[in-house]
Image: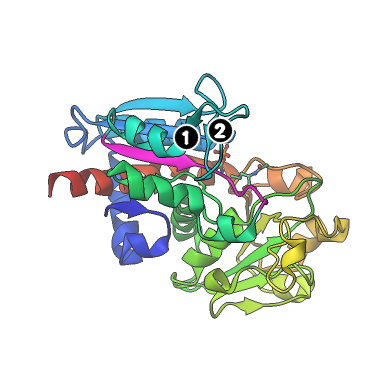
């Protein structure tokens, strides 16, 4: 595996899950693999879980880790080619990427959607420049349109907790005061569409996700109908993906609090587990009682971020020695 940006990079998901459970039994069993290798993690945006779990994963594999917060201490980076750089940006990404790649063997990139241009975000302009100009294995730590390390951890968590062979998994939109990316729901849909689950997406009209990720999934606009019989509720806010109206891309179209996941919502389900990638705004996305209930999986999900990252970084390391 040379890059990790979506579910298809993992190949067979059953094999990937098996590898994840083997690693979970002993997460240090491949610590020789990363000896004298360096993993560089580049953050254009904030992070708690990704920052910690990916460093832990790299160390499980015996790698050294360098973390760079681009906005704290590095030169301000220009990302557009052709710009006369007479403003506040001192360095261009086109030099910064090959320079950074001199000091490492693989690169993780966190670069959220900027909401300036739907096309730039949906063509993954920043992430693809890293893939093209670094000459090193590159993995997404949440880029503009996907968060595959999160979605893989979510799949592991569902596999560990499912009570039937083919559980019903519901991705539900929930309200949030700020415009958030579509990366998490996109990748969750990307993975659930390839997993052995009955997958349903529910959201208000106007919040349709990109067809590239929805594929054949059932979309149910009635949240109550969607929740009926659910085994897993996966809540997330996302801003308008601009599928039917590109002018609305990245906008908050509504903050309808009737979509907040509360005990009544959960009573419509098959005693479902509650999931969220975190960070979560309580009593916007989910009420205190639901996130604190024994059926809440938010902490095991976060714990599985170390496991998904260990599998992915191990496979990238293996690509170096081939
Ligand atoms: C980010 C998002 O919604 O994509 C990160 C989630 C892992 N969330 C926030 O910025 C609050
Ligand atoms: N879930 C997740 O990726 O969290 P962070 O933004 O804190 O890394």
Report the colour scheme.
Answer: rainbow
Q: Is residue 308 visible?
A: no
Is label 1 in a helix, a strand or a loop? strand
Contact flag, marks 1 and 2 (Cβ < 8 Å): yes
Q: Is residue 110 magenta?
A: yes
Q: Position of residue 22 (x, y in %)?
A: 28, 49
Q: Position of residue 181 (x, y in %)?
A: 65, 52
Q: Looking at the rendering, which quadrant does residue 198 occupy?
A: bottom right
* Residue at the spot 69% in from the left edge and 49% down from the top edge: 180
Closer to the camera: disc 1 or disc 2? 2
Residue under circle 2?
A: 85
Q: Which residues are magenta?
A: 105-116
Label of residue 92 in the image = 1
In the rendered structure, which disc, 1 or 2, sits on the residue that comes first in sequence?
A: 2
Is label 2 in a helix, a strand or a loop? loop
Marks 1 and 2 sit apart, C-alpha to C-alpha, by: 9 Å
| For residue 152, side relative to residue 244 (left or right) | left
* Residue at the spot 66% in from the left edge and 68% down from the top edge: 270
Pick the front one: 186 or 244: 244
Pick the front one: 242 or 4: 242
- Quadrant of the image where one finds ligand 1: top right
């Amino acid at each position: 595996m040379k890059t990790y940006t979506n579910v298809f990079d993992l190949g067979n998901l059953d094999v990937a899950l098996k590898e994840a459970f083997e690693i979970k039994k002993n997460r240090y069993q491949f610590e020789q693999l990363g000896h004298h290798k360096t993993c560089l993690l580049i953050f254009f945006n904030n992070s708690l879980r990704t920052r910690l779990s990916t460093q832990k994963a790299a160390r499980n594999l015996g790698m050294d880790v360098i973390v760079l917060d681009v906005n704290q201490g590095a030169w301000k980076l220009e990302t557009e080619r052709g710009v006369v750089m007479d403003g506040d940006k001192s360095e261009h990404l086109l030099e910064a990427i090959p320079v950074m790649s001199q000091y490492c063997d693989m690169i993780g990139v966190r670069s959220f959607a900027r909401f300036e241009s739907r096309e730039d975000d949906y063509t993954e302009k920043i992430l693809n420049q890293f893939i093209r100009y670094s000459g090193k294995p590159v993995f997404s730590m949440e880029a503009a349109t996907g968060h595959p390390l999160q979605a893989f951890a979510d799949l592991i968590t569902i596999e560990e907790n499912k009570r039937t062979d083919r559980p019903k998994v519901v991705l539900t939109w929930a309200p949030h005061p700020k415009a958030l990316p579509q990366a998490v729901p996109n990748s969750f849909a990307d993975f659930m569409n390839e997993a052995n689950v009955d997958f349903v997406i529910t959201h208000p009209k106007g919040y349709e996700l990109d067809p590239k990720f929805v594929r054949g999934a059932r979309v149910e606009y009635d949240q109550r109908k969607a929740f009926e019989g659910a085994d897993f509720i996966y809540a997330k806010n996302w801003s308008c993906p601009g599928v039917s109206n590109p002018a609305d891309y990245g906008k908050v179209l509504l903050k309808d609090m009737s979509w907040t996941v509360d005990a009544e919502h959960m009573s419509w389900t098959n005693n479902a587990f509650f999931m969220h990638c975190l960070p979560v705004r309580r009593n916007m996305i989910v009420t205190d009682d639901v996130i604190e209930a024994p059926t809440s999986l938010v902490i095991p999900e976060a714990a599985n971020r170390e496991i998904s990252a260990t599998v992915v970084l191990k496979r990238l390391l293996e690509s170096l020695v081939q």
